[in-house]
Amino acid sequence: MKNKGLEIKIKRAITLLFAVAALPLQAQPTADQILERIDRNLSSENRVFESSMTIHGRRSSRTITSKTYAVGDKRSFTEYLSPPREEGTKMLKLEEQLWIYSPSTDRTIQISGHMLRQSVMGSDLSYEDMMDDRKLTETYNAEVVGTEEIGGRDCWILQLSGKVDDLAYASRRLWVDRERYVPLKEELFAKSGKLLKRSEMSDVEQIEGRWFPRTVFYRDMLKQGSEGTEFRITDIRFNQEIPDYIFSKAALKQ
């Protein structure tokens, strides 16, 4: 009987040991689950935000402010508020099409094809960057390839590869905050594997129940003379009532 009791205790101890050993594995989310949490933080049904974009050059910097209305990833409308040179310029995105209205010429032009890769107002952002607001889970496959500390925060390193054809960047590498599920650093690559852009996210705050980086510093690795562009969200509200007429070409000249 004593041997039988000892055998049971040993089996229970072994079972407990395996259960404890398995806990960290169970707590580790998959790469797809990490992407879903990122989308939950960064994507929304609609949003209204004001922002400042500071373009740094070797000799000087300039700041452009704007207000943007967006619904999902298909419709957005941006009006530039300052400086006077840019005030009144408006940008409208409908599905895959983009129009820009310039008050100085009173003309509306459509941006398409290779023009989408051009810089927005001399910044490190292209029109493609401004247009593509799709969820990461819809456009990329992901794999966890390591861990690293960024700014004192433990991060997963995710390698993303495109699963649709119409992407500006064939692959990405993300450093994702393990506690808040927000990217803190990102590298964007061409199909050839060449590094095209690098960005760093900061000022992460909890806004309406989601973690959100207020500041992103972009650097176009191919742009000579650039000292980077800082894009800062000064105010953002999610799930707002946005009138449909804003998303029309008629609204560009109003």
Image: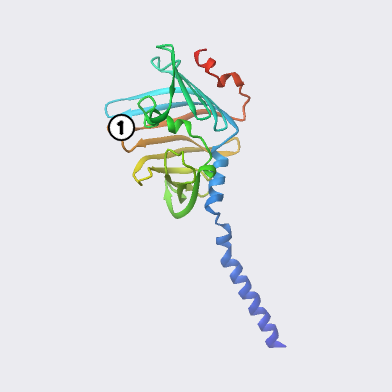
Q: Against 34, is 237 above or below?
A: above
Of 160 and 198, which appears nearest the observer? 160
User: Which residue lies under the disc numbered 1?
Assistant: 226
Of 110 and 229, which appears nearest the observer? 110
Q: Secondary structure at mark 1?
A: strand
Picture colour scheme: rainbow
Q: Against 121, is 135 above or below?
A: below
The residue shown at (27%, 33%) is 224
Q: Look at the image and tell me in which quarter the N terminus lies.
A: bottom right
Quarter residue 189 falls in: top left
Judged left or right of residue 140, residue 104 is left
Judged left or right of residue 90, residue 20 is right
Give, as a three-letter code, the residue at label 1: Ser
The residue shown at (27%, 26%) is 59
Q: How many marks?
A: 1
Residue 95 location (% of width, % of height): 53, 29
Instruction: Please rate how many residues cluster around mark 1, counting C-alpha atoms within 10 Å: few if below 14, some from 14 to 19, many from 20.
Output: some
Residue 216 location (% of width, % of height): 43, 35
Residue 160 location (% of width, % of height): 46, 48
Quarter residue 21 falls in: bottom right
Q: Against 98, is 15 above or below?
A: below
